[in-house]
């Protein structure tokens, strides 16, 4: 572990955050004041959509290569946009997992090099914690709160009681909601990235036109399942054949509404669990890429009103993968004295609630460890 620099301000810390867990290379500089205020000085995201589009999904080898090509320039540009120099940094934080291991290694190795050359602390960040704390980039979001983390790789409900303090209330037992969006869009040939493309198509459809299953709806727990929905949607699309575009729009709208209904049904149970163990006022945070979906956001807002929860969500630009959320968690941990040595490892799997994941895995327990 590197020594904490003596030049850290009594009022704030300045952290560079690097994110490379999937198909976006991102870097950001964030200033975290000790009174809790946060200032995003820069936030750059280099998309890889163009190189992955021909394949209809993210190709890990191509993603890793693209990260290597962009990581140096985007970190330098983040400092330039922030109007600071390398010597101004108090720490460098980087995603250390979970994610595509090639990309995670690229960003983490870049951060290690900077930490050594600048003699500043290194902080390895759980990518999911970045999403979990992302609303705090732009608004007051005190602990504790109930979190719906809904992204391409994860769909979980957690109680968030502090930095690094997570309790799993529910998780998907198979596919994530975002993955289901992307694969359904691929089946329907809507383009890449699939989630936003499907949402655009759904705007022209009738959400009640096609009946689709709602897995686990009405069950007394807070777990999710999307595999059966994905299969049912694929079969419904096959039945459409070469029908008009209206049929595709109706299917997209019906699918989107079904996912929204499932998320709300499971979240209702989690709200009951959360309110039984926490005192009011109750806060509900939705974060991750799928949190950018307008229909889902609107439905969750109505659910919060009915259950006396305040909905807190990051701006759309911070719903997807970004460096600002990584820098923020890095700053929070730096102020708590939680830094890492150069031996911190890149991890393809890294549950937020490791205890629950090991003792009662919801899905994906194998050689790489528990997924959730």
Image: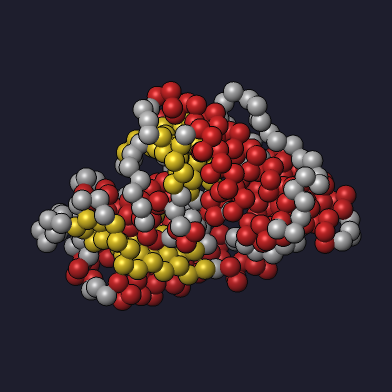
Q: x, y (%) of residue 335? A: 21, 49
154 shown above or below 81: above
Query: Which residue sits at x=65%, y=48%?
Result: 180
Q: Is residue 369 visible?
A: no
Q: x, y (%) of residue 35? A: 20, 51
Image quadrant where residue 285 sits: top left
Query: Which residue sits at x=51%, y=38%?
Result: 305
Q: x, y (%) of residue 315? A: 46, 57
Query: Which residue sits at x=81%, y=47%?
Result: 209
How many marks the image carries: the answer is 0
Image quadrant where residue 26 sits: bottom left
Q: Is residue 137 visible?
A: yes
247 vs 195, left or right, is right
Q: Nearer the viewer, residue 123 or 330?
A: 330
88 vs 146, left or right, is left
Image quadrant where residue 352 sits: top left
Q: Residue furthest left?
A: 6
262 vs 125, left or right, is right
Q: x, y (%) of residue 23? A: 52, 62
Query: Which residue sits at x=89%, y=56%?
Result: 241
Q: Nearer the viewer, residue 18 or 289?
A: 289
How is this picture coloured? secondary structure
């Amino acid at each position: 572990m590197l020594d904490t620099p003596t030049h850290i301000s009594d009022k704030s810390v300045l952290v560079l955050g690097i994110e490379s867990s999937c198909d976006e290379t991102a870097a950001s500089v964030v200033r975290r004041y000790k009174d809790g205020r946060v200032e995003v000085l820069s936030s750059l995201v280099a998309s890889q959509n163009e190189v992955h589009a021909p394949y209809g999904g993210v190709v890990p080898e191509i993603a890793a290569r693209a990260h290597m090509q962009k990581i140096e320039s985007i970190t330098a540009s983040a400092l330039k946009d922030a109007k600071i120099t390398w010597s101004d940094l108090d720490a460098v934080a980087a995603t250390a997992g979970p994610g595509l291991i090639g990309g995670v290694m690229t960003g983490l190795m870049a951060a290690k090099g900077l930490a050594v050359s600048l003699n500043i602390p290194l902080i390895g960040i759980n990518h999911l914690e970045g999403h979990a704390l992302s609303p705090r980039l732009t608004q007051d979001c005190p602990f504790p709160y109930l979190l719906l983390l809904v992204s391409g790789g994860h769909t979980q409900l957690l109680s968030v009681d502090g930095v690094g303090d997570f309790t799993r209330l529910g998780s998907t037992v198979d596919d994530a909601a975002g993955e289901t969006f992307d694969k359904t869009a691929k089946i329907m040939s809507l383009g890449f990235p699939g989630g936003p493309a499907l949402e655009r198509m759904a705007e022209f459809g009738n959400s009640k036109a096609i009946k689709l299953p709602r897995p686990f709806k009405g069950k007394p727990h807070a777990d999710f399942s999307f595999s059966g929905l994905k299969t049912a949607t694929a079969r419904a699309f096959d039945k459409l054949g070469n029908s008009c575009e209206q049929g595709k729009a109706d299917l997209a709208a019906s699918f989107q509404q079904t996912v929204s209904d499932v998320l709300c049904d499971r979240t209702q149970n989690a709200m009951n669990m959360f309110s039984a163990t926490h005192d009011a006022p109750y806060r509900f945070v939705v974060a991750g890429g799928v949190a950018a979906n307008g229909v889902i956001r609107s439905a969750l807002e109505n659910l919060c009103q009915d259950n006396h929860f305040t909905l807190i969500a990051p701006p759309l630009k911070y719903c997807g993968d970004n460096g600002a959320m990584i820098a923020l968690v890095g700053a929070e941990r730096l102020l708590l004295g939680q830094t890492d040595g150069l031996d911190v490892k890149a991890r393809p799997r890294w549950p937020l609630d490791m205890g629950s994941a090991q003792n009662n895995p919801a899905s994906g327990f194998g050689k790489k460890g528990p997924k959730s």
